[in-house]
Image: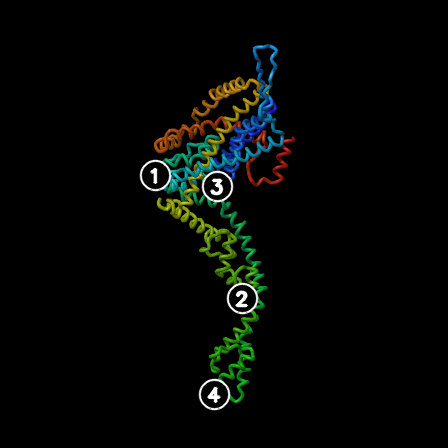
Amino acid sequence: MKSKHYVFLFLVTGVYLLFELAFNARLLDVVGSTLDHDAVDEIEFFGRIISGIAFTLVLWPMVLKYAARDDREKQVYTLETEREISAPTRIELPSKAPKKPYGLVRTGFLLAITLALGVATSYGIQEGILKGITATSSAAQKRAAATLVALTGAMHSENVSLDGLPMDQVDLDSPEGKTFLAILPALALSTDNLEEKTENELGQIVRQRTVHALGGALAFYNKAYLPSEAALKESFNGYLRLADPHFEAAQKIPEEQAKAYRQYRNGLGKYSPYTLPKSLYKRVRSNVRKNGVYVDSYWDPRDKAGFYAAVEKKIRNRIDPQYNHQMFQHFGFHLPSDLNFQGFIQHKKMQGYWHSKMSTPKHLTLATGWSFEEFKARMFDPWMDYVVENEVERLLSPIETFEDGGTNVTLGNDAIRAAYIPLVAFIFSTIGALVHTFKTAAFALLMGMYRWKPIAYAVAGCAAAVLTYVWVIPAATTSNSVSESLLFTKLEEDTIEKAGPGMAMVMRGLIQVQTEFYPISEAIRTKVLFGIRYEKDWELKDLEDWISNFLS
């Protein structure tokens, strides 16, 4: 490769390193403050993409070397001489034409293919690691993970004190505190009797988490209940516009029945229904049908109720289809046309409709006109009790329900993934940052020393070794407030006993190195990359603001 190739590799590796370091800071902020599945999945997605780019940058030097090869420099010239000096010289050329270096387009295509394969490979490796951890985790670990994920999600924003786990010793807003919180589910999986230590607080935390997600009772009252109540009143007005014509038509049914019956009686002539000879029954039935009253073939002319039923059926067949069609278009279900406002609100289907609009449980009865105090006492608090009861029961279900085929196997598998995603992401991000710091330095040297690659790599290696010895190792091995806390040391002892010293050493190193690593990464994210957030839903305005900050 030539100097220009090393310039290219230096630039792309340096840019990657900036985004990798910024991602490390953002990763810590996200997983250190929440274990919400959507937020974790989003940051995990970007982490895998960045790790894939890191893997690709390891391959690109080989791709560039292959694309830049020039076999024309390797033509073989053999000089064959005989004893006589005047013997002719013979040149032996290779049998195949020499290969020329790839052009810019072909080289770019190779780099793009390598990038796609690198990202896919890295993505698959990390997914395979998580699947392997999930597959080898026991049902007891999956249940413990479900509990821990629920608890950890509340620890950052709530004052949580777990029996036997003194959380008040840890500053959760510090870099090391955020790292501890991010890997706590994986770290605490080795703790004995976890459920006994957390059961008393679990219900309280589930309630706090749910209330926080809803914004509080007053916010839900103002933003959900009151608007839905107003919308329901407007819906009742729409209901009346459809129901009133149908109701009025239905109210006239008795009058129509009486009128039709009089016509039937008058048509019998000198007979009454009770004196009519049976020999005339068939003829009478036929005449009644001709007049539009479709009595059945066995109708008895003395059966007044049957006649009235046939008249009502005739009218209903005329007025009901259009009404029902309008109801389904407007509400999606059928409602009687004789409801007043309270009947409309309390109807089972309207209650279900109202609950669906507010995402509240359907076993609770909603009513209009509630003050906030009434709403909280009759709706919000019972709702929270219901959520707590069901969630705690689900999280503390028997262990066998978390085994394959059990009712909670999906919950357990998702919890194990959520517990280990931050740890796996931190490991890959830290390795990528350290390796490519060395590579960036090496490419910087190779730009001017590409003819003396061994010397350049040796200098870069010595610099990396010195940096590791002077900064990385001391940062990873120097205790901080978290790693010295009774909580961490207790969890670390359990991890060493159950998972081995290697896992405990990695977790301690991650917590301790962030004290030095996070401020640098966060400064790059906010000052150099202008606060990049690594979110999928970036809007055009976000991009415009980012470009504006960059240009200014």
Is the residue marked by circle 3 packed among few (<14), some (14-19), or many (20+) residues within 10 Å?
some
In three-dimensional space, the C-alpha distance between marks 1 and 3, rounded to whole angstroms, equals 25 Å
Q: Is residue 151 visible?
A: no
- Alpha carbon separation for disc pair 3 and 2: 46 Å
Vertical placement of 285 versus 124: above or below? Answer: below
Task: Classify the position of the C terminus by image quarter.
Answer: top right
Name the residue that disc number 2 marks. Answer: 337
Label placed on residue 193: 1
Amino acid at the residue labelled 4: Pro
Q: In which quarter of the image is residue 145?
A: top left
For marks 2 and 1, the one nearer the N-term is: 1
Given this view, does label 1 or label 4 mark the residue nearer the observer? Answer: 4
Q: Can residue 286 be seen in this view?
A: yes
Marks 4/2: CA distance?
42 Å
Quadrant position of the N terminus in the picture:
top right
Q: Position of residue 328 (x, y in %)?
A: 55, 61
